[in-house]
Amino acid sequence: MSHQVHAFEPPERFVAGTVGPPGERTFFLQARGDGRLVSVALEKVQVSLLAEKLEELLAEATRRFGVELPDAPAVVSDNEPLETPVDEEFRVGTLGLAYDVDTATVVIEAIAAGETAEGELGDDDLDDAEESDDEPDDDLDRLRVRLTPQAARAFIDRARRVVAAGRPPCPLCGQPLDPAGHLCPRHNGYHR
């Protein structure tokens, strides 16, 4: 089966967003450009780590290559919801980041989760994997986006707001508070 590479170099819009009420949200990366709309699902922690690692990548690009970055997004923050229809192309298993010095852009690649988990390979599969010259992810769908440093900064800002917009944490244990109540382990299971 062939894989698809959804490339947006650059996209008209690239955002992180959610569908559903707090506590039941599904997180998405969504790219739009050239009349196409691609949405891929991922976990909340992946969105948070992507924003964090993008920030580190931009700081490293500034340090090593002298890339000038604005402190805040140069454009007005994108607070619009995800565009509809939000059809999941695939669930993200791996995220990759790179800085392209030649074009002064950030490359984000979201790769679909594989059909088998790493620990499920048999001894015969390990021998085949060692002999293969291809990357193990070459046959998986992927979303590739190329952003300017300013667009990457705007993505980071929105991603952090989306992650923070969930349920507030319990001040005692840090677990998310449910609207119906919270069984806090610090209160020996009594509702709070």
Image (tube, grey):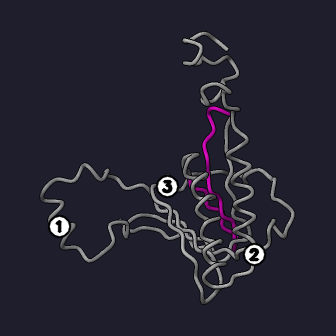
| Residue type (three-letter) at the residue carrying disc 3 | Val
Residue at image position (70%, 74%) is 149
Q: Earlier in the sequence, mark 2 or mark 3?
A: 2
| Residue type (three-letter) at the residue carrying disc 2 | Leu
Distance between mark 1 and mark 3 Cα atoms: 25 Å
Label 1 packing within 10 angstroms: few (<14), some (14-19), many (20+): few
Residue 155 left/right relative to 108:
right
Observer-nearest of 163 and 69:
69
Quarter of the image with the N terminus in it: bottom left
Q: Would you say the magenta stretch is mainly helix, strand or loop? A: strand
Residue 92 left/right relative to 10:
left
Q: Is residue 100 magenta?
A: no
Distance between mark 2 and mark 3 Cα atoms: 28 Å
Q: Which mark is residue 92?
A: 3
Residue 109 left/right relative to 74:
left
Q: Which mark is residue 128?
A: 1
Residue at image position (45%, 64%) is 141
Would you name the residue on which mark 2 appears? 69
| Nearest to viewer (mark 1 / mark 2) | 2
Residue 93, x across and y down, in percent: 45, 55
Label 3 packing within 10 angstroms: few (<14), some (14-19), many (20+): many
Residue 114, x across and y down, in percent: 37, 56
